[in-house]
Image (spheres, coloured by chain):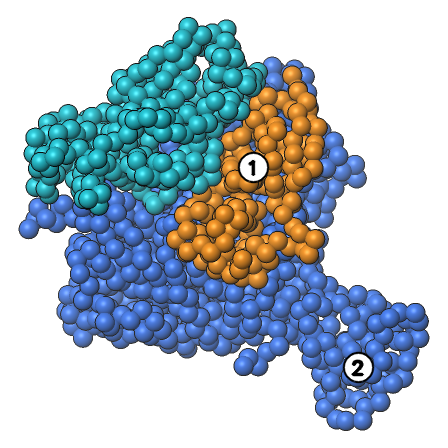
Chain colours: A orange, B blue, C cyan
Amino acid sequence: MKKLIRLTVNDREYDVAVLPNQTLVDVIRYELGLTGAKKGCEMGDCGSCTVLMDGKPVNSCLVLAMQAAGRKIQTIEGIETENGLHPVQEAFVQKGAIQCGFCSSGMILTAKSLLDKNPNPTEQDIRKSLSGNLCRCTGYQHIIEAVKSVTP
Amino acid sequence: MSEYNVINSRATRLDAPAKATGKAVYIDDMTLPGMLYGALLQSPLAHARILRIDTSKACKLPGVKSVVTAKDAGLIKYGVSPARYDETLFCHDKVRYVGDEIAAVAAVDLATALEAVSLIQVDCEELPAVLDIDAAMADGAPVLHNDYPGNVCAEVHAEFGDVEAALKTCDLVRTTTFKNKRQDAAFIEPQGCLANYDLSGNLTLYSSTQVPHYVQRTLSMVLQLPIGRVRVVKPYVGGGFGIKAAANHMELAACLLSMKTGKPVKMNFTREQVFTYGRARHQFIHTMTTGVKKDGTIVALKHQCHLDGGAYSSFGIATVYYSGSLLGGPYKLPNMKYDGYRIYTNKPACGAQRGHGGVAARACWEQQLDMIAEELKMDPAEFRLKNIMVAGDVTCNDLNMSSLGMKECIEAIRDGSDWKSKKGKLPKGKGIGMACGFFVSGAGYPIYRSDTYHGTVMVKLTEDGGKALVYTASAEIGQGSDTTFAMIVAEAMGIRLEDVRLESGDTDFGVDLGAYSSRQTLMTGHAAKEAAEDVKKQVLDVLSKELNVPVSDMDIRNSFVVFKKDNVDFSGLRTRYIKEHRGWTDNPQSGPLTFTEAARIAYLAKGSIVGTGKYKPPQLGGKYKGAAVGTSPAYGCSAQVAEVTVDMETGQITVDNITDAHDCGRAINVTSVEAQMVGSVSMGLGEALFEEVKFDNKGHVINADLSEYKIPTMLDMPSVKPIIVESDEPNGPFGAKEVGEGAIMPTIPAILNAVYDAIGVRIHELPLTPERVWQAICDCQKEK
Amino acid sequence: MLLPKFDFHAPETVNEACQMLSEYGLKAKLIAGGTDLMVNMKKKILAPEQIISISQIRELDHLDVSGDRILIGAGVTVADLCESKTIAGYLPALGQGANNLGTPLIRNLATIGGNIGSARPAADLPPGLMAYGAEVVLQSKAGIRTLPLDNFFLGPGFTALQPDEILTEIRILVPPAGSGAAYVNIGIRKAQDCNLVNVASYFALDSNGIIQNARVVMGCVGPKPFRAVSAEKILIGQKPDIQLFEKAGEAASADSQPIDDFRSCATYKRSMVGVLTQRTLQQAWTRIKNQE
């Protein structure tokens, strides 16, 4: 049976009726219409469904929607600023870090959370922090350059 | 400074902002009103005879709208090559691999569809299965397809020159056998589709495909709909790498279900289904005998190859040809003999994947060439340079290297990697290796025999002037083709990139064979350039009449009309334009005549300004059987140096860096060229070190996920130094040619050669897992 | 991809959760980070009727030093372990395991309790924990009991945890001065890998520089992580040096019970146990020397 839960997504509160076995990614994509988080594997392997939960990047395919109640969720749709693209988004655009784009939402969110914590990461910090976000197009190089180019 | 205004620069991709913000729409992001969800029933057995299919329970489940089997779908055979149409939408007599499609369901939601699938009862008689080449070729082996006894799906025998005679003249002849493993392309977006059969009898399929055109034809043929009623639209696609380059069962099933129900039907593959559908790189077993003179001149190559094809042909006919023909270059090779066999096995079909047919062959040969260079005491770079082809050379199998910066690529990586101070001088456990490769810039012929244009492009100017709208059926799948064509159009018209808008991936826009065989930049690019030039000419023709200035005295640059002679009075045109736009704040007051004004004037004179372009390669290649595979209007080429560290105790390899040079003709978007180069290295590195689709003894894929099928993570990829070597390809638009596949060719052998340099032992089987490397080190120590 | 149907509960306290467990018994599964359970449910390996979430129970989130013990709540995430100064300072081998577990995304969800409770033979945290002599606290409606982690694992996916029990805490004695430990794992790639072999080693020196206590724990080479007893015997009573570590490595290899599987063959795993045992002992020794 569906239960009403309150999800805080991108600073907006949604009252949404969900089934116990619905994952967070399915609810934000299909119930809230926030399709920026992608489903690449649904097993927590690829990172394309990454969202920030209380500021930390997680695989939203491994989170039950009900477990996310009361947590602060941020998706790719929620990081643009009044001045337009978030600096990480802008860097990805400028540095050619986006090809097919399917990993981009997750990659950008994970990079953002890294930079929020550590504004001057080394290349090894970047590689380690983003190692759970798989990309098959870029070979990662332009992504690393983009993250490096974001200045605090 | 480039002589160009738009191309040959680093442009920001048109699609990047949408993709960076999550706004770009991929197939699973789409919904249509009243949409149903589909699911497939797939065989749990590798080989079985179907005795009875009972769908009655599934049909009765509330929420189920349609259940279809071969009875509904019919038995029209399809596939990739018309010479080997060996698939039907659903199996009717036999299933031939775990995952073979038996039935499909459409229901109000996915849970109901999946439950219905579980209620379909299939009675089967299990048959013995053949799961590898040896088993499939054994005497008395079970046969998958009655039309193909011995399970030989296709064989190729070709000889150029006289190999046996040539080998007798050689000073050194060496034979090696090499084996790769079945790959998965592991694009991040699983295949998905959304079919909508409307009340007028028109079918629209939205699909995550690389080839809307071929999908359209297959749908029309199999579902028996007039092709004019079938439209295929590609939203943004999350990678394809060859696997999405043909219609799949799910697309056909979704369309059939939509036709049956009159409602839109959405279907997706799970990641597991991506693996069980397969269609990625074959397993190849190559045996090569190469003969050289003692001065290092390559004289002859005798080559035999067996491909584990899986249960159906897919692209396999082309694959078995490519794996022979792509060794014709880039070295001068007067004598080449090739015997290739593609074998049916009870596993998912293999097909085309980046570097189609050529990657394992290249890995085998480039490692063998390194071994020969060592025996000859020649530096591997010098040995390769000694034999290298140059622009204008034609291979023994009639591939015409109309441009070829291969020599320059080798020199660039040699110098860029500091090869001379490293090769042979690194400590144990450290190694450096190099390799080369090349690939077609588009297949010379369509997959079906036809005189069709390979690409048509339409450029239309907005009637109000100022913007060029480009319509192409080509497929942006992540490689950046939309931006490339917008740049080509802007350059050819003389307008700014921001004055171009582009729509692609829709069969209603024309014919384009799609994103495979690295064809779009050259072929669609040609058509785009021609359409742009057509539009430009139409505008200038009108201006010429209006201003009484010969067209040859005018040009368009940076979205302004420029006149070769001074004192051209265009004030009358400007006044007309301004009068039409009273109250507008952006009217041109002074300065040169804008393209916007010119385009508006042209429209006023002629109506909508539409330019068209088309491209079809000239007659290419030899007359021998199979000559079509491997011919191309142009060839891109690559050389790479890999540097590795091997942990001598554990066998773990770290690729420390790669120096990578590629001749892409003239680079249209420099950033995208580099992106293709580094991305190719990444895929090659994965295949070299980690990747292998594994099966149990019942034919199930046992690593059908992205944790056990291991593609490189950000920690596995080294820093890559991309060096673009430009040539001017006479057959390419603005001199451009391919980069997307040639760039993968050297990666595996460069790593193999570097690992040898590090550990002193050759490994002839992929992937180079820690265990395999450790075993090789142990075996070598035992021998000593 | 759909999950099986189940009811979901989110108790606020351990007691409440214990109450639910006693009610549902084997029909229930606990979920914390979910990184293991969710995958198993999606693969249809598990289909519990009741899911009891413990990720919101605050009393499972602590990570403190209390007297001579380090107490780690079962709900502490692996990312928390990676970032904890307590772990880095006192239990670096556990920190190494945490830093190599899954991916950064997984580490943000996965908990120490889950990594222990799922009882995978290749898990990253148990070897380090066992090397430090950790014990686990198991709570049920009936009360609390503690168990050495050595005795907790029974086989792949099987533990001494009763159906009505919750693993609530991990307790580790603060390692004495003159002790050191390390953890090393091998996979196919450099991140996001199921280990082929993993080893953690610990030893403590007496005032004369003699090894008085040693624990070598191997993963992936048996149905559960377990101790290389003969390697430990070789170490105890000796002064640490490379030759001794080599001998201990050989003994550990002999103690290991690897099987061939699709990831790797037994021969390789057995050999790697030796290499990793040596390397972890070497690292542990370096750590001891760095304390001085």
Look at 29% across and 52% down and name the residue there.
B654
Subunit under mark 1:
A
In screen coordinates, is B572 left or right of C207? right
Q: Helix, strand or loop at disc 1?
A: loop
Look at 72% across and 68% down and name the residue there.
B499
- The type of residue carrying mark 2 is Leu
Q: Which of the two residues, B736 or B171, is positioned nearer the viewer here?
A: B736
Residue B473 shows up from this direction: no
Q: Which of the two residues, B118 or B33, is positioned nearer the viewer here?
A: B33
Subunit under mark 2:
B
On the image, the x and y values in percent for residue B81 come to: 50, 49
In screen coordinates, is B363 left or right of C238? right
Please identify the quarter of the rendering in which residue B370 is found: bottom left
The residue singled out by tag 1 in the image is A54
Badge number at residue B593: 2
Badge number at residue B635: none
